[in-house]
Image (cartoon, rainbow, N blue to C red):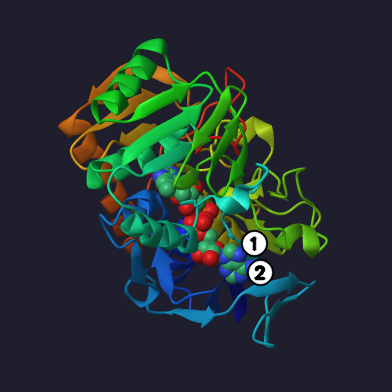
Amino acid sequence: MARVVVIGAGYAGVMAANRLAAAGRSDVGVTVVNPRPDFVERVRLHEHAAGATHAVRPLSGLLHRDVRLRVATVETIAERSVRLDDGGALAFDHLLYAVGSTAAHDLPGAENAWHVADLDGAQALRTRLRQLPGGARVVVIGGGLTGIETSAEIAYHYPFLDVELVAPEVAAWLPDASRTRIARKLVDAGIVLRTGRRATAVHPDGVATDAGWLPSACTVWAGALAVPDLARRSGLPVAPDGRLRTDETLVCLGHPRIVGAGDAVAPPRHVAAHLRMSCQAAMPLGAHAADTVLALIRGERPVALSIGMVGQGISLGRRDGFAQATHRDDTPRRFTLSGRAAALVKERVCRFTLSSMRFPRAYRWRSGATPTVPAPTPTTVR
Ligand SMILES: Cc1cc2nc3c(=O)[nH]c(=O)nc-3n(C[C@H](O)[C@H](O)[C@H](O)COP(=O)(O)OP(=O)(O)OC[C@H]3O[C@@H](n4cnc5c(N)ncnc54)[C@H](O)[C@@H]3O)c2cc1C
């Protein structure tokens, strides 16, 4: 029996575990280790924070029936086993590293801010928003996708709060026309845009910026993401930001029994420079990682990664949105969609991720292309 241990039941880990189990090999046993018995729909955490939805569902309804779930946190990875925080250990023949990402606390005073990068953060913000009196000011820091979606979601569900967005620019990576469109929609939603300035520190009662002080009853940090330090702590090869370094088949460099997927891995640039930290990339990475593990079990040479991006779907509250089609290398195409239609597309995509995990062998993705322009830094753009 080949024992496969998957660390992390997020988009990459669940897709990988289910695809392995659905391969129907009686000589492969799959165990997933995750700190909670639930799947967290991270792509809905801004909705969760604003009280629009509950972004948590039992893993029992999502994992393949032959996958075993161990509710625990992996503390360290050794040569052929992982040590768990409940005092236990699991031996493996193949390990799939899919620990995802969370908020980077790299802004001074970030502990004074709320965030939506993980469930605990989103839950705390949900509680805080419900306590705020009418007219209270909420300052969202960050002009990336998370900052845009979070400020719009809060403004939609809490029209009696004053929502402000602070960032040097909003959607800086998009073409001018798309940027202008999104900014106009945010303003129409009642959000005050404080662009052209950078937050320098968060205090309990406000935000210091390079253009002055902004009082705030609730500050939301929607800046960079960071990865857990499990790989680094375990002595595995990591990129400077802590992501596990792999070859182009997702096998960890120098550790042929370890395969990585999702936000927490750094495959070589020639196959992955264009892959943002995103669910859009994590799902095919998880599927590819499963195929790599199966090839290793069969004693075959795994194939190189090939993933093309499709677009960026942005929800702006529940009734509005914006979608930017992209080339395979994630550079923008001319096609965009806006308004209710874009909101519907985004909602469909969120649902599609769950159904894809339930039918993992049928899951297909767009093939990749060599990037033609430098990609955004994966830790700063989702
Ligand atoms: C508010 C928000 C909105 C987003 N919207 C979009 C979007 O519209 N489109 C898009 O493509 N992407 C979006 N993203 C990004 C997307 O959610 C992530 O890129 C995606 O979740 C990465 O998947 P993953 O499987 O790598 O990691 P995750 O989904 O983060 O899962 C990792 C899992 O590993 C577990 N874990 C961590 N450490 C350990 C350990 N030591 N032991 C055991 N388990 C561990 C975690 O608890 C978690 O369950 C959004 C993110 C946020 C925060």
State the residue in front, 228 or 15: 228
Q: Looking at the rendered structure, which numbered label has been put on residue 296?
A: 1
Amino acid beneath label 1: Leu
User: Which residue is painted at 46% across and 42% down in the image?
Assistant: 216
Residue 148 shown left or right of residue 169 in the figure: left
User: Which residue is painted at 65% across and 47% down in the image?
Assistant: 109
Q: Is mark 1 within 8 Å of ligand 1?
A: no
**Quadrant placement of the N terminus:** bottom right
In this rendering, the answer to whether 45 lies above or below 140 is: below
Q: Looking at the rendered structure, which numbered label has been put on residue 94?
A: 2
Q: Residue furthest bottom?
A: 87
State the residue in front, 308 or 24: 308
| Mark 2 vs 1, N-terminal side | 2
In this rendering, the answer to whether 15 lies above or below 69 is: above
Q: Looking at the rendered structure, which numbered label has been put on residue 128?
A: none
State the residue in front, 13 or 73: 73
In this rendering, the answer to whether 170 lies above or below 334 is: below
User: Which residue is painted at 43% across and 32% down in the image?
Assistant: 165
x, y (%) of residue 142?
50, 34
